[in-house]
Image: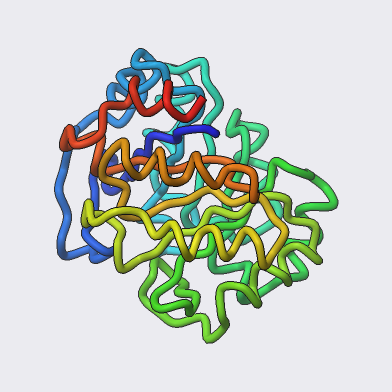
Amino acid sequence: MLIFPAIDIRGGKCVRLLKGDFRQETVFSDSPATMAKKWQDQGAEYLHLVDLDGALAGSSQNLAAIKEILATVAIPVELGGGIRRLEQIEKLLDMGIARVILGSVAVKDPALVRQACAEFGERVVVGIDAKDGIVAVEGWEKSGNIGVIELARKMKDAGVKTIIYTDISRDGTLGGVNVEATVNLARESGIKIVASGGVKSLEDIRALKAQESVGIEGVIAGKSIYMGTLDLPAAIQLAK
């Protein structure tokens, strides 16, 4: 099981939001690349990047910061946030992104996801962000009017191999990861799941690790590693 340190980028800075609310933002660093190197130096094997401005705008907005991260670290990087066109996917993969995360477009244009999977295989993953079991889109600002499990099954049919599942109500709260919903999604969909939202401590890592066999591929750690409630090297060791 992998631990993915999260680097959320807004206005070129490394930030964290509370429950996806853009009005509740904490800036942790003016240099996302410096943070990326810090997490790599602590043993991270994969980074999770989100272009928050991109999620709202519908196209990548922080490419300069993303390119600087790619030039700074040697480990693979995945990127989400406003990726909604095939040519955009190709450009990001060519730029050095290891895999792209499709979110809103999975709800609005599943045919594009199918095409992307056919062309780029496992370098395409889908992010399903949900409130009360219903998918949210466009930077979590709107309801996608579809259930999490229903969408996950559609994505499996489209060729998706990995889903990043975020419980929005827990994201940035340090309230503990939603293990039950994550495990249920893995079981019901038959797709590998990366858990996200609410991770606080080694207890969360331990609880997910115990369920690894149902298809838990990894977990994203954000606020917990920035605030120090989760020791990243210890979490990586436990996940292994």
Horizontal relation, residue 86 to residue 40: left or right: right
In front of the other: 83 or 142? 142
In front of the other: 123 or 163? 163
Image coordinates of residue 46 in percent, x first then y, are 50, 28
Image coordinates of residue 20 in percent, x first then y, are 29, 63
The answer to which quarter of the image holds residue 220 is top left
Image coordinates of residue 181 in percent, x first then y, are 48, 65
Q: In the image as oriented, which residue stretches furthest toward the bottom?
A: 145
Image coordinates of residue 145 in percent, x first then y, are 53, 86
Horizontal relation, residue 55 to residue 121: left or right: left
The reply to whether residue 111 is visible in this rendering is yes
- Identified at 46% across, 62% down, the residue is 180
The reply to whether residue 13 is visible in this rendering is no
Q: In the image as oriented, which residue stretches furthest toward the front?
A: 210
The answer to which quarter of the image holds residue 204 is top left
- Identified at 61% across, 73% down, the residue is 149
The count of marks equals 0
